[in-house]
């Protein structure tokens, strides 16, 4: 259940921290005091749309957070555990900046608005003051009946089967209409992919082949030129090294005085001999490493020729063939695996239709059973709300065409007076009657909800007198099973609550602020008196308020 709500700089609230308990909590205050602010802040924590206008006028951002006790909510704990979030606590936080941007956190970890909505659906259920308008729509009737029946998983499975059936029909239609074209394309793709499979050109193979072809093609030339250079260095006939050795020998034979003048030249010639001899050795080593492999060269040139031939065929550069191979393979796989042949796909469509109809029949049977029980439960609540003469029923009719929801249309029908035929809600109910019918339906729906925290936002609009007291008793009975927060303007309803939260608007210099506080017994009497008689409190209204509070509390002990 909701245990704490913290609000900072939201609307006309500067700072507020509320601790909430189980049971029924009445939320009251003058018109315009800000009762909707409380629900607006809670809605933000539950993933509702953020509005920059909700930031207090002199603040940079609004910051709201809600803490829930989830010890008795296994679905919420499982949701957190699946996302590796701490599951022993549940704190939702939302920040909205003046620029309209918002951020969200769940247990201190960044989250999306969709995450807040998904988790919030396991935590709390809000019944708005306009819920009776939604009750005029048949989609709402179907959803409420399915919730009451408790077959949510079967309804989800039914919708999934319908979507699979619809997709298979779409593929079958496309295949039938474009069969020849698709088959021709598949045949061409299969041939092209097989050819590229045989080529099996690796992503970086082309560059290696071209480099190898370059090396092999010029191997003979490199060997010939290297051997020629070796002869130039050390050949017996005219090689540089023998000639240099002869020069050194003859200069060294000169008389001593001339030989001394040529000492530097002899040193240079000696160095040249060493350099030429070393160059000859390196050239000999290089020539020994040159391999002539005409067979490998022929294979490399043949493979390069095949690569270029297929590239020209597909009008792409040779280095783009691997990417082309992938694209064509993916397209072929999609055609092969996506549609299949007509016979197989027709069988799949037929099988899915059969499964959908079987599931739809099972859901319809469950709905028919639940419709009777739902109608009886709402009828009982209407009697409690002083509409005992009204007749409520849940009518099921066949849909004109299959739908994800199944075979059924669901409508809530009401006959307000005996002898009148049951007709749709929108056609017979007055405003006050519709409010009571709406409340009866919501109470029945809430009793079968797996969510223990319920919020009712002025669902008692249009109700007064003794009926208002009964409405309060209904809400208190719901609160006894979990937690009910109800925004109300009726003292008869507020008097039934376990706790009473009062909201007041205060003008402070140039600023208007909202204050919220849980009332003690004296405070409750004063607020009930205000609700009974306006701003001027008389002894009579205070006594009436005291009597009303005492009577409601005695009734529940």
Image (tube, grey):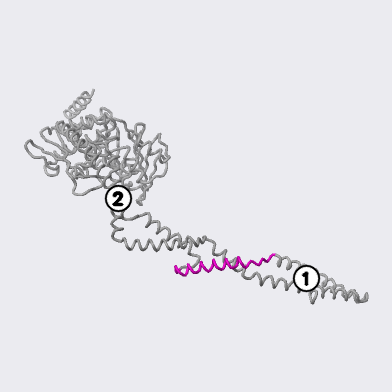
State which tag comes first along the sequence, 1 or 2. 1
The outermost residue toward the left is 419
Separation of marks 1 and 2 at Cα, in angstroms: 86 Å
- The quadrant holding residue 5 is top left
Q: Badge 1: how crowded within 10 Å, few (<14), some, or many (20+)? A: some
State which quarter of the image contains the C terminus.
top left
The residue where tag 2 is placed is: 347
- Name the one closer to the observer, 200 or 454: 200
State which quarter of the image contains the N terminus.
top left
CB contact under 8 Å: marks 1 and 2: no
Q: Badge 2: how crowded within 10 Å, few (<14), some, or many (20+)? A: few
Mark 1 vs mark 2: give the one in front: 2
Question: Is residue 105 found inside the magenta-colored segment of the image?
Answer: no
- Name the one closer to the observer, 507 or 480: 480
State the image coordinates of residue 65 (x, y, percent, origin top left).
36, 40
State the image coordinates of residue 404 (x, y, percent, origin top left).
26, 47
The residue where tag 1 is placed is: 276
Q: Element type at marker 2?
A: helix
Residue sitting at 26 percent across and 45 percent down? 354
Where are the magenta residues, as a range? 289-315
Residue sitting at 78 percent across and 72 percent down? 234
């Amino acid at each position: 259940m909701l245990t704490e709500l913290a609000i900072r700089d939201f609307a006309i609230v500067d700072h507020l921290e509320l601790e909430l308990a189980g049971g029924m909590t009445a939320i009251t205050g003058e018109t315009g005091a800000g009762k909707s602010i409380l629900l607006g802040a809670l809605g933000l924590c539950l993933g509702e749309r953020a509005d920059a206008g909700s930031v207090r006028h002199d603040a940079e951002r609004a910051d709201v957070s809600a803490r829930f006790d989830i010890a008795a909510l296994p679905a919420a704990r499982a949701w957190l555990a699946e996302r590796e979030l701490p599951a022993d606590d549940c704190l939702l936080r939302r920040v909205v900046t003046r620029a309209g941007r918002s951020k969200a956190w769940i247990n201190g970890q960044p989250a999306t608005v969709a995450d807040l909505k998904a988790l919030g659906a396991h935590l709390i259920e809000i019944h708005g003051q306009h819920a009776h308008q939604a009750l005029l729509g048949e989609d709402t009737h179907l959803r409420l009946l399915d919730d009451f029946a408790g077959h949510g998983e079967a309804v989800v499975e039914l919708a999934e089967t319908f979507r699979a059936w619809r997709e298979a029909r779409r593929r079958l239609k496309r295949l039938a209409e474009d069969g020849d074209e698709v088959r021709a394309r598949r045949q061409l793709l299969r041939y092209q992919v097989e050819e590229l499979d045989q080529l099996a050109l690796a992503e970086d193979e082309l560059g290696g082949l071209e480099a190898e072809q370059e090396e092999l093609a010029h191997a003979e030339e490199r060997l010939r030129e290297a051997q020629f250079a070796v002869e130039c260095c050390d050949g017996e006939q005219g090689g540089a090294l023998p000639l240099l050795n002869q020069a050194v020998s003859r200069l060294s034979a000169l008389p001593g005085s001339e030989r001394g003048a040529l000492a530097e030249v002899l040193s240079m010639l000696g160095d040249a001999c060493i350099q030429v001899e070393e160059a000859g050795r390196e050239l000999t080593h290089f020539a020994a490493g040159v391999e002539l492999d005409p067979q490998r060269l022929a294979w490399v040139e043949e493979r390069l020729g095949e690569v270029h031939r297929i590239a020209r065929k597909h009008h792409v550069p040779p280095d783009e063939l691997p990417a082309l191979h992938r694209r064509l393979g993916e397209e072929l796989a999609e055609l092969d695996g996506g549609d299949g042949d007509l016979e197989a796909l027709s069988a799949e469509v037929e099988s899915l239709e059969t499964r959908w109809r079987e599931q739809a029949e099972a859901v319809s049977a469950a709905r028919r059973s639940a419709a009777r029980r739902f109608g009886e439960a709402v009828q009982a609540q209407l009697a409690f709300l002083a509409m005992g003469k009204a007749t409520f029923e849940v009518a099921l009719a066949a849909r004109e065409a299959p739908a994800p929801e199944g075979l059924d249309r669901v409508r809530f029908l009401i006959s307000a007076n005996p002898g009148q035929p049951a007709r749709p809600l929108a056609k017979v109910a007055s405003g006050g009657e519709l409010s009571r019918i709406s409340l009866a339906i919501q109470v029945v729906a809430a009793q079968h909800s797996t969510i223990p925290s319920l919020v009712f936002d002025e669902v008692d609009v249009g109700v007064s007198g003794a009926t208002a007291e009964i409405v309060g008793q209904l809400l208190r009975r719901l609160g006894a099973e979990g937690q009910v927060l109800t925004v109300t303007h009726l003292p008869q309803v507020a008097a039934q609550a376990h706790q009473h939260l009062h909201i007041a608007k205060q003008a402070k210099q140039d600023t208007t602020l909202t204050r919220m506080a849980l009332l003690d017994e004296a405070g409750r009497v004063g607020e009930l008196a205000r609700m009974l008689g306006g701003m001027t409190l008389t002894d009579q209204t205070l006594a009436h308020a005291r009597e009303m509070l005492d009577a409601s509390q005695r009734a529940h002990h």
